[in-house]
Amino acid sequence: MANCTVCHNMNPKLAGSIGPELYASSEALLRARIMSATYPAGYKPKRNTTMMVELPELEADIPALFYFLNH
């Protein structure tokens, strides 16, 4: 939460100050954004920014983030 809510809303169904809503994000999208600040092939971004930075230290948390954002 501390890393994500700086830009994204604490409620994943709502947009944040800089970042879009995250609810129902795919694991592929989370992995690409967190690990390399990129998008999966063919994905159309909700916002066209380059603000997000790589957060590879969160790699082990991706499955938990996916679960949180999809339930």
Image (spheres, grey):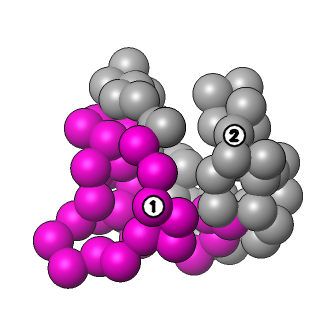
Q: Quadrant of the C terminus?
A: bottom right
Residue designated by label 2: 7
**In magenta segment, residue 57:** no
- Position in image of residue 31 (x %, y %): 31, 50
- Position in image of residue 51 (x %, y %): 49, 37
In this rendering, would 68 be left or right of 13? Answer: left
Q: Amino acid at mark 2?
A: Cys
Secondary structure at numbered mark 1: loop
31, above or below 2, in the image: below
In this rendering, would 16 be left or right of 44? Answer: right
In this rendering, would 32 be left or right of 50? Answer: left
**In magenta segment, residue 48:** yes
Residue designated by label 1: 48
Cα distance in 3D space between marks 2 and 1: 14 Å
Where does the magenta region start and end? 21-50
| Residue closest to the eye, 41 or 2 | 41
User: Which residue shows up at 36% across the image and 48% down it?
Assistant: 33
Q: Comparing marks 2 and 1, which lies closer to the viewer?
A: 1
* Residue 3 position by quadrant: top right
